[in-house]
Amino acid sequence: MTLNRRREEFPTLALGIHLLSHSLGPVPRAVRESMLAYCDAWEKHTGEDAWATSWWELSQLVGDRIARILGGASGSVQIQPNASIGMATVASCFDFKSGRRNKVVTTALDFPSMEYIWDGQRQVGAQVEVIKPVDNSVPLERILAAIDDETCLVALSHTSYQTSSRIDAQAIVDHAHSKGALVLLDVYQSAGVVPLAAADWKVDFLIGGTIKWLCGGPSCGYLYVRPELQRDLKPKLTGWVAHDSPFDFAHAPMRYARSVRRFAQGTPSIPALYSAIPGLEIIEEVGIQQIAAESQRRTQWIIEFALERGWTVNTPHDVDKRGGSVMVWRPEPQRLVERLAEKRVFVDCRPAGGLRISPHFFNTDEEVHEAMEILASME
């Protein structure tokens, strides 16, 4: 079956070869209309209450769209200002100073925000173990060995932003639960390009955002919470929207919402929600399974192209152990990024990994091949 790449929905693609979905997806054409709808609702607010007619429910509606992409149930995703706030909200559910179960397991391939947040939790009693990578990935056996009876949370990137290496989520969740620990996965570099199965994995938390593979705008993060946990946890990072009766404007103590909304904070970023909707609609219409199959095929071709030329590939060669990006090491990577941009080929780089190259469903095979040939001509 031929994939509908929906290229007409992305005006940005006329400017060159966009291989940057790991960083910023191209803006869908319909975002302009969606943002105008936001402005219209705001403009007419005095005659038709935007909060009552659409804005108050918008977080749940967008959250449910994201939940489907994550493989989760309706009512399992709370929109967040960004992924960092989502993670900090989860961290605030734990009392690291009480008892002996105060260990958090992370890895050195996680996004810096994760490291910063968990390093901060050391100040309130968390014992943080950071597992070092081996050959651009963190061996599963090292992760499992680090999870013990003192572990309260395992917080890992499902797909690493540095190397595109992907962990075995099911094995980690099963083992962590057998030890009485919860699991948080950062799926920022997975959602929209890798099939996810939140409910089947029984994972406790997922965090991410819409700005990358989901073709959305910034400031629209999300937090998935396993439904069975939603009435038990009490985030200390909270706000009026998380209250069970927010429009009572009641004084403390907090009475949490009896739903995933208890993981909200203050007033949601309504413009960010509007900016995310068109991309989410396109991803759902094209289909995650089809998108993933295209990604696997094209990333494999990029890896083979690079290896044939003797280039170092800092991404797992095994399709089941990588995400949607390929990291290729070439000398002076930042300079190459600039030279490629002059040729209208858009990638970026990371200090240790090299060039980050990320074909998405809207790319054609021809332009992916053209981009790699242009890169080869720069040797």
Image: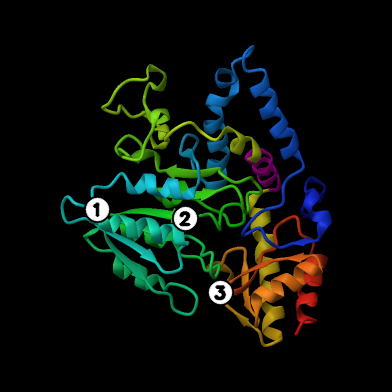
- For the residues labelled 2 and 1, the Cα–Cα distance comes to 23 Å
**Looking at this view, is 217 or 357 the one in front?**
217
Look at the image and say whether residue 282 sits in the magenta stretch. Answer: yes
The residue type indicated by label 2 comes to: Asp
Quarter of the image where one finds residue 371:
bottom right
Which of the image's four quarters has the C terminus? bottom right
Please check the rendered image and state whether residue 280 is part of the magenta-colored stretch, yes or no: yes
Q: Which residue type does callout 3 highlight? A: Pro
Q: What's the magenta region?
A: 276-286
- Give coordinates of residue 351: x percent, y percent: 56, 74
- Residue labelled with disc 2: 186
Question: 318 left or right of 340?
Answer: left
Q: Residue 124 shows which numbered tag?
A: 1
Residue 296, given in percent of the width and then of the height, sits at 65, 65
Residue 351, disc = 3
Picture quarter with the N terminus: bottom right
Residue plotted at (70% across, 85% down): 308
Q: Nearer the viewer, residue 187 or 377?
A: 377
Q: CA distance from mark 1 to mark 3?
A: 32 Å
Question: Whole-Å distance between the Cαs marked 2 and 3?
Answer: 21 Å
Secondary structure found at label 3: loop
Residue 361 can be seen, yes or no: yes
| Residue at disc 1, secondary structure | helix
